[in-house]
Image (cartoon, rainbow, N blue to C red):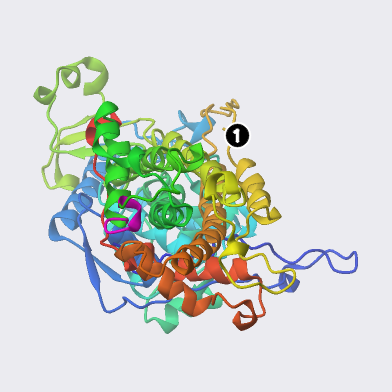
Amino acid sequence: MFKDFRHHGRIVFLGSLVGGLLLTPGALATPEYYPIKATMEDQTITLTGRDLTIDQALRIARFGAKVQLSADAEQREADAYGLLLEAAAEGITIYRFNRGAGDQREVVTFTGDPMSPENKDKIAKRQLATFEAGARSGLGPEVGDEEIVRAMMVIRANTLTWASASPPVMQMLIDLLNNRITPVVQSRGTLGEADLAQIENLEATMVGKGDCYYRGVRMPAAQALKEAGLKPVAPFGADDDALDVTNAYATGQAVLLIADGKAALDWADLTYAIDLNGMNSSVTPLGKPVQDARPFASLNWDASRILNLIKGSYLFLDDPKRIIQDPESLRASSIRQGSAWKAWGALRDTVITQINSSDNNPAVRVGLSPSDSWELSTPQFMKFYVKGGKGSNGQHGYVVSNANWDPYPMSNDVEAFTNALANMDVAVTLRIDRFSSTFFTVDKPADIMPPTPTGYRPSGGGDYMPIDIWQEIQSMTAPLTPQGQAMPVEDLQAQTRIKLQHARKAVDVSMDLLAQDMLVGSYWLDVRKTQRADREFGPSPTAAWTAFRKVVPLDSTLRPDRPIGDVTAAWLKANPATNFYPAGEPDFPADRK
């Protein structure tokens, strides 16, 4: 499904104090930065606000595909902007437009038509000052991966079609993406509910303030705009509110998490198939009698997938040395992996809804009438009904306050996926260890394989490395305690930034663990093949094993003089498991009730 799953997953720290002296702004160390590989910049994806896919978002964020708005989306956004202006002209109270923000929410900022000469000048100056101030928003370290910022930008562009940004600001966001002008964004300053600081950094770039990266090269935003042939935008209306009341920073990272999480789960299924062959396992737990007895769709799906991966293997032939029952970590791996796929599927579905809807406050809905729902005709809602006039080209609708910036259920699903992944990883860790026991393997490699160099651990069994990796994964599994701190208006926080950092790190470290599993399982394929040359492992495990041996030869003297776990992990990340078997995504809605 995805062309490449490599990512850095790093947020890079700025240079520290030097010689005990405070750094002046001009003396700040240049942070390490990882630009994207724009291999798809010849593609253009149309944003409709309704049907953006994970794959499309990834092509834009990670591979530089360009974007354009559909005619319907462009008109919808322009209509919402017009309705906002008309609402103010009709005297409707609007948070962060003709009223202040936070504890200033009842303070009147202007009255009457926003397009009157007096109001127009006041609003324009206020908006420009707000955008310019965005260069000072947030707290480092800076985001070091271009793909994270681009993911934020494309999610905001798609969801902004449901909000009320002015058309020039909407177009500037598209232009920044298409020209690869990527703002310098600070990683902190969000409470996990409305990523204000990160979008404010983006706003600064739009008006030529602060720093950005132009095609991977850092420079002042004003210079980047000039080199790209763009002029700083002139924000108006409630553009600051329309842009920054969003969880696009978090949601963009969730998109990347889904892509990289799928890569890890695909490899988990394939290394499991390799392990089954290496252990000379009894494959009865995967069969129909067992699966029919417990019809969880996600578990049945994964068991069927593993069966197809090992179809044609010697495991389906009789072997008098095969034990009746493997260690639980092998028998239950399909259960743990199917459960992780279930959590992944729930997150995927939630994020797809999130990236194709509005989390903006206020909600601006063009075309709604009092007769469309019973509550809309009540006195409370009628206070926010826009009758329609010159500002909205006669269109009516509602402009109402809300809490749609609250990032649930996405925040819950991110954390659930992290925990499901860890529960899978413990099985991976233990099945690696079980290869060191002849109680399960029956055969000793030393009785089958030629002697190995002193100090060489061909199987990894009993090695410290998988346990060390597992301990690191364990540290990311504790759910964050729900927190609420009373601020002027808001009193809930979601910690989505931290949850996503845990989740993305857990995926990255899981790939390191799967690399250890690949080292162990592939060695045992060598053992079983040496034991009987006529043994088959199934097309997919054989293809992966053969390709892997070209990079990590069985003969340790031919291996690179680098940590072999790093070499293997890099190979897994550069070669999706679906290179070796048909791609596919699970779809088991009955199991997601």
* Residue 76 position in % (x across, y down): 18, 50
Task: Return the residue nearer the eye: 376 or 82.
Answer: 376
The residue at the point 53 percent across, 57 percent down is: 517
* Residue 450 position in % (x across, y down): 60, 73
The residue at the point 46 percent across, 59 percent down is: 203
* Residue 531 position in % (x across, y down): 47, 65
The residue at the point 59 percent across, 25 percent down is: 486
314 inside magenta stretch: yes
Lateral position of residue 316 relative to residue 226, left or right: left
Check the image and name the residue furthest to the right: 20
Q: Quadrant of residue 68?
A: bottom left
Task: Return the residue nearer the eye: 69 or 7.
Answer: 7
* Residue 330 position in % (x across, y down): 47, 43
Lateral position of residue 336 relative to residue 16, left or right: left
Looking at the rendered structure, the number of numbered marks drawn on it comes to 1
Q: Which residue is mark 1?
A: 478
Residue 553 visible to the viewer: yes
**Label 1 packing within 10 angstroms: few (<14), some (14-19), many (20+):** few
The residue at the point 56 percent across, 65 percent down is: 448
Above or below for 545 versus 241: below
Q: Which stretch appears magenta?
A: 310-316
* Viewport quadrant of the N terminus: bottom left
Task: Return the residue nearer the eye: 589 or 274.
Answer: 274
Residue 36 visible to the viewer: no
At mark 1, the secondary structure is loop
* Viewport quadrant of the C terminus: top left
143 inside magenta stretch: no
Check the image and name the residue furthest to the front: 320
The kind of residue on which mark 1 rests is Ala
Task: Return the residue nearer the eye: 370 or 478.
Answer: 478
